[in-house]
Amino acid sequence: MVTSARSFDVVVIGAGPAGGYLAGKVAAAGYEVALVEEHREVGEPIQCGGLVTPRVFDYVKCKETIIGSVHGAELYSPSGRRLVIDGHQTEAVVVQRALFDRAIATDAVRKGAHTFLGAQAQGATRANGGVDVVIDQDGASKTLTCKILIGCDGVRSNVAKWFNILRPKKIIPGFEIEMVGVRGDPGLVTLFIGNEIAPGFFGWIIPSGDTARVGLCVGEGNAYAYLERMLRRPEVQQYTKGAQPILYIAGGIPLGFPKRTYADNVLVVGDAAWQAKAVSGGGIFTALTCSDLASTTTIQALEARDYSSKMLHRYHRAWTRSIGKELRKDLAIHESFSKLTDTQFEELFDIFDNARMQELIEKKGDIDFPSKVGWALIKEDPRLLKYVGKALRAMIGKSVGM
Ligand SMILES: Cc1cc2nc3c(=O)[nH]c(=O)nc-3n(C[C@H](O)[C@H](O)[C@H](O)COP(=O)(O)OP(=O)(O)OC[C@H]3O[C@@H](n4cnc5c(N)ncnc54)[C@H](O)[C@@H]3O)c2cc1C
């Protein structure tokens, strides 16, 4: 039974980085914004390694959530060969993800957003030129009416489903264990590559202050079972033997490139719009970038009182023409590399085990724009072309004039 109704300019579903940031931007422009989160605590449960580049702090002012910094990576091949790529300066930082999300939502509230916590959005329909959103908060059903509904509700977005916005081509499962007592250089991320370890993706150890997050994603199958097996491997055990778990983290990474991230009165942003990088699974920087572009279109639509899909298409155009270009390339890179055999990975290690290649990676490597270093490496050693698929070869042709 509906017990109350409240009216807003904008209702944002999901208080992750995309939702919290968007709610704050639109509220700061003087509009009434509701931020709806199904959990009682913003940021919980954590579904993330927390590795981001310092670029995210151009959007959000919460450097106090940083618990470590990373200047390079060590990579293990399927047979256990080790390669170190060291940039010698901070390339990325690790944030305490729950505190990070909470800091963004706190800022949104300070800017005037209204939070509904422990409130699950259960349905939404268009009505009277706007949208009626039904939420369940503490067993009470409430209706929030708005002009624009924004789905920042993550990888299994219901908002996208309710408004017939396509679902990701694939969601790849990930599992991570935060552990105490992991050894290793706290300035290096460790990556484990190979089809027996993590087919279709890779495994990792991300140092995070006095703990470390040991995890993996796999193209398909049971991520937890793969992680248990990874933890038994000697190259992993040298870091994790004797370490104890304190937190289990499960989640999924959306893969694909959406045709549409808008409809009349509706936008989807962040993981809900498949805006994570297919190469690394990182989605915080891209979610914030797209959220910023979504806030611009939302404010323009509210100013013009035009909530049509034609107006809201501006957001789709803006993100696909900017960060979307990188996301498309990342998808092609991922598709190429997820098909490689272990023998081919070993051949790649041979190619990269070379001072000039490592120097290039150290100089041009950027986890937010992985394709940039990819093009440079192919130019340096065209043998790499053998390992890339059709889609990527077509893109390379355009980018490096081959
Ligand atoms: C194992 C793993 C490790 C990762 N590691 C990293 C990393 O190191 N660095 C990085 O950049 N990215 C990482 N990512 C990706 C990153 O976590 C996501 O890309 C990012 O959280 C996307 O932000 P978002 O705001 O779009 O969605 P989310 O953070 O998923 O937020 C969505 C919110 O919506 C809420 N919600 C959903 N449905 C409803 C509903 N019906 N009603 C109300 N609320 C609802 C959820 O509770 C959630 O709070 C990782 C992902 C996984 C799975």
Image: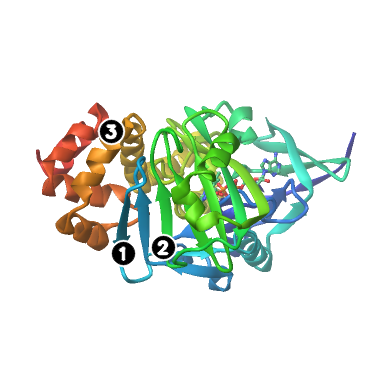
Q: In the figure, 285 relative to 68: above or below?
A: above
Callout 2: SS: strand
Mark toward the start of the polypeptide (2 vs 1): 1
Q: Residue at x 64, y 29 (%)?
A: 162
Task: Tell me the kind of residue under disc 2.
Answer: Leu
Q: Residue at x 41, y 40 (%)?
A: 278
Amino acid at dot 1: Asp
Kindly identify which numbered label has been placed on residue 86: 1
Q: Give residue 70's position: percent from left, percent from top.
A: 42, 66
- Amino acid on which the number 3 mark rests in the picture: Thr
- Indicate which label's residue lies in the foreground, 3 or 2: 3
Q: Quadrant of residue 387?
A: top left
For the residues labelled 3 and 2, say whether their Cβ atoms are less than 8 Å apart.
no
Looking at the image, which is closer to me, 230 or 348? 230
- Is the C-beta of the residue carrying label 2 under 8 Å from the nearest atom of ligand 1? no
Residue contact at pointers 2 and 1, CB within 8 angstroms:
yes
Q: Is residue 330 left or right of residue 242?
A: left
Q: Is residue 53 left or right of residue 210?
A: left
* Mark 1: few/some/many CA within 10 Å (<14, 14-19, 20+): many
